[in-house]
Image: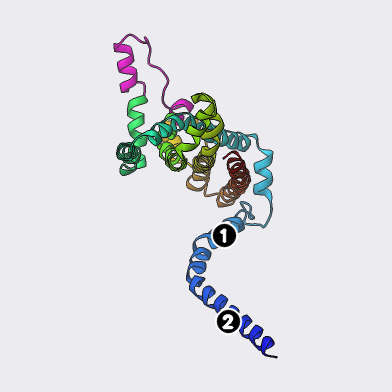
Amino acid sequence: MADALNARELRQDEWREKLAMFGLSLPALVLVFAIIVVPVGWLFWLSLFNDEGVLSLSNYTRMFDSKSYTRIFITTFKVSILTTVFCVLISYPFSYFLSQLPKRWAAIGLFTVLLPFWTSLLVRTYAWLVVLQRKGLVNEWGIELGLWDQPLKLAHNLNGTLVGMVHIMLPFMVLPLYASMRAINADYVKAASNLGANPTRAFWLVFFPLSLPGLLAGMVVVFVLCLGFFVTPAVLGGGKVIMVSMKIETLIDLFFNFGTASALGVVLMILTLAVLFLAHRLLRLDKILGERGA
C-alpha cells in the first residue's frame, strides 16, 4: 500500500514538474508561434489564391510549368553551391593556419575575419561594385600595368556576384571551421606521426576527418544563407543573375502578385528544409565516423 502511495506521489511530482517547465517555456513558445508559425502559415495561405483571389493551386502549377521559374531556381542553387565551394577552398587553409598559431595571434586573425561585420552589407557590396566595374580599380590598374588591353567584365554578371557573396560569406565558414580545428587534440596527429605516417598522411587520415563536423556546419550555414540572398546579386549581378529572392521582390513591388511570390517563398522554404534535413543526417554520420577514426 505504501509503495502504491509513493508511486502516485512520484507521478504527481513528475506532472507538477512538467507543468512548471511548460509554464516557464510558455512565453518562448508564444513568441515562436507569433514570429515564425503565424507568418509562415500566412505565407502558405496567400500562395493558395490566384490573381482573381480564387482558391486554387495555379501559382504552384504555373511555377512548375514555366521554364523561367525553373531557370531562377537553377541559378539560385548554382550561385549558392559555387559560393559554398569557393568559401571552402579559401576558408579551410586559412582556418587551418589560424588553428596552428598561438592563441594570441589566432585572436588577431579572427579579429580580421570579424572586422567586415562592422560595415553594412550594402556598403560592402557597393564597394565591390566600385572595385570591379569597367572603370573600377581592378580594370584601371590592370590596363596601366599592361596585364590586359580592354576592361574585363568583372561586374554585372555571375563573376561579380560570386566575388561579393564569397567575401560576405567567408566569416560564416571560417568561424565553425576554426572552432572545430582548435578543439582537435594535437597529440592525435603526433601519435600518427609516431606510428610512421608522414605529415600529409597524418593530416588526411587524422586531422581532416576530425574537422569534418565544423566543415559541414559551415557549408550548411553558407549554403542556406545564400539561398535567400538579395542585396549582393541584385547590385553586382546587374539584372543578369536572377535569384528567387529578387523574383519575389519584383512580383510584389511591380506586379503586386502576392500569390505567386508567396508560392515561391514556400517552395524555397521547403527546399531549404530538405537541405537542412540531409545535412543533419550527414553531420550525424560524420560525427560517428570521426569518433571511430579517433
- Tag 1: amino acid: Trp
Look at 50% across and 70% down and name the residue there.
Answer: 25
Dot 1 alpha-carbon crowd within 10 angstroms: few under 14, some 14 to 19, many 20 or more:
few
Nearest the viewer among 166 and 64 is 166
Which quadrant is the C terminus positioned in?
top right
- Residue 16 sits in which quadrant? bottom right
Question: Is 11 located above or below residue 141 in the figure?
Answer: below
The answer to whether 188 appears left or right of 54 in the picture is: left
Question: Is 179 located above or below residue 160 in the figure?
Answer: below
Dot 2 alpha-carbon crowd within 10 angstroms: few under 14, some 14 to 19, many 20 or more:
few
Q: Nearer the viewer, mark 2 or mark 1?
A: 2
Look at 53% across and 42% down and name the residue there.
Answer: 213
Q: Is residue 143 magenta?
A: yes
Look at 66% across and 37% down and name the residue there.
Answer: 66
Give x and y (percent) for residue 28.
Answer: 48, 67
Q: Please say whether residue 135 is visible from this viewpoint.
A: no
Give x and y (percent) for residue 239.
Answer: 47, 32
Nearest the viewer among 120 and 252 is 120
Identify the residue position indicated by label 2 in the image: 13
> Label 2 vs label 1: CA separation?
40 Å
Q: Which residues are magenta?
A: 133-162
- Residue 149 sits in which quadrant? top left
Look at 68% across and 86% down and name the residue there.
Answer: 3
Secondary structure of the residue carrying tag 2 is: helix
Q: Please say whether residue 120 is visible from this viewpoint.
A: yes
Q: Of the residues under marks 2 and 1, which one precedes in the sequence? A: 2
Q: Give the number of the disc on residue 137.
A: none
Identify the residue position indicated by label 1 in the image: 42
